[in-house]
Amino acid sequence: MKVLFLILLFLVLCPAFYFYCIMPRFTRKEQTKRFAHQLFAHRGLFNPKLGIPENSMPAFSRAIEKGYGIELDVQVTKDNRIVVFHDYSLGRMCGIDIPLETKTYAELQELCLQNTRETIPLLSDVLKLVNGQVPLLVEIKLHSFHTYPCALVDQLLQEYHGSYCIESFNSLALLWYRRHRPEVVRGQLSSNLTNPVAEGGFLLSFLVKHLLINCIGRPDFIAYSYKDYKNLSFTLNKCLYKTPVFAWTLRSPETFEASKKRFDSFIFDSFIPKNE
């Protein structure tokens, strides 16, 4: 009887613990609605064929002109400046295969983005350019388990008067905001990760994939790969907890149309959707 009792207890507690782990935050529903039904230009409205690289000032200017929200990536340089850049390595965009974090901002200014005259911008300069004209979706890149870049990012965003929210694959960034800036809307980035996209390797990627680490960051929204909408934890967040869900990254009108009924907001590139 004791063994049976323990088995039954286990069967009851495990699902309860799972639902607790994937649970979002509920107290910022109204604030999160400001970012629902938005179209976010992925890394700005870039177009290499027009000489407009991703995460560049012209890409952000173009998104503003079209009235799209802007999704952008931020990370820290060797001298603790916050720049807007996606990859950890400079190889793909600048032709030098070394980590961005090993360079100072001044050194980065000697490099060009995709053979153009554009350079890696500071977040502060992008904020001046946008100036509240469109909403911002700021993805925080953490190079390690150290969260000090969050404080540097927040210092800049506190002086910004436009609408913004933050997101990250790394739930430690969300935890920092939960502790220090709970009023800021925050989102958990995820997908059915086959590679350790989330900082921290395969273990953290597994936890992020199944949203089991929501108990740390308690996100207000989930930004999930549009291809992986059948993930159980994603579905429970959307249908049971009524968590707002953002789709990334849509790259054709067909995927956009197919995702309209599955997601609340959309991150796109490589085509121009109708801004309804």
Image: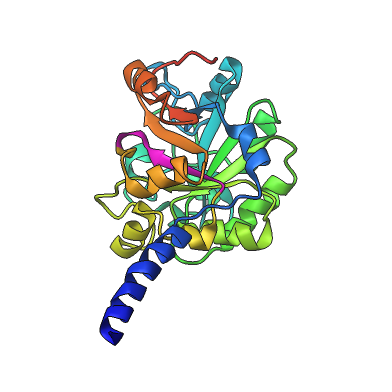
Q: How is the image coloured?
A: rainbow
When the figure is inspected, residue 222 is found, relative to residue 52, above or below; the finding is: below
Residue 14 location in percent, x, y?
36, 67
Closer to us: 274 or 87: 274
When the figure is inspected, residue 96 is found, relative to residue 62, above or below; the finding is: below
Residue at image position (29%, 49%) is 193
Residue at image position (67%, 40%) is 31
Closer to us: 120 or 191: 191
Q: Which residues are magenta?
A: 220-227
Q: Quadrant of residue 182?
A: bottom right
Residue 113 location in percent, x, y?
42, 34
Q: Is any atom of residue 172 visible in this view?
A: no
The question of residue 226 being in magenta is answered with yes
Numbered marks: total: 0
The secondary structure that dominates the magenta segment is strand
Residue most toward the front? 1
Residue 180 location in percent, x, y?
67, 61
The question of residue 67 being in magenta is answered with no
Closer to us: 274 or 215: 215
When the figure is inspected, residue 120 is found, relative to residue 59, above or below; the finding is: below
Residue most toward the left? 194
Q: Quadrant of residue 162?
A: top right
When the figure is inspected, residue 117 is found, relative to residue 147, above or below; the finding is: above
Residue at image position (55%, 27%) is 38
Q: Is any atom of residue 188 visible in this view?
A: yes
Report the quarter where the C terminus lies: top right
Residue most toward the bottom? 2
Report the quarter where the N terminus lies: bottom left
Residue at image position (64%, 33%) is 34
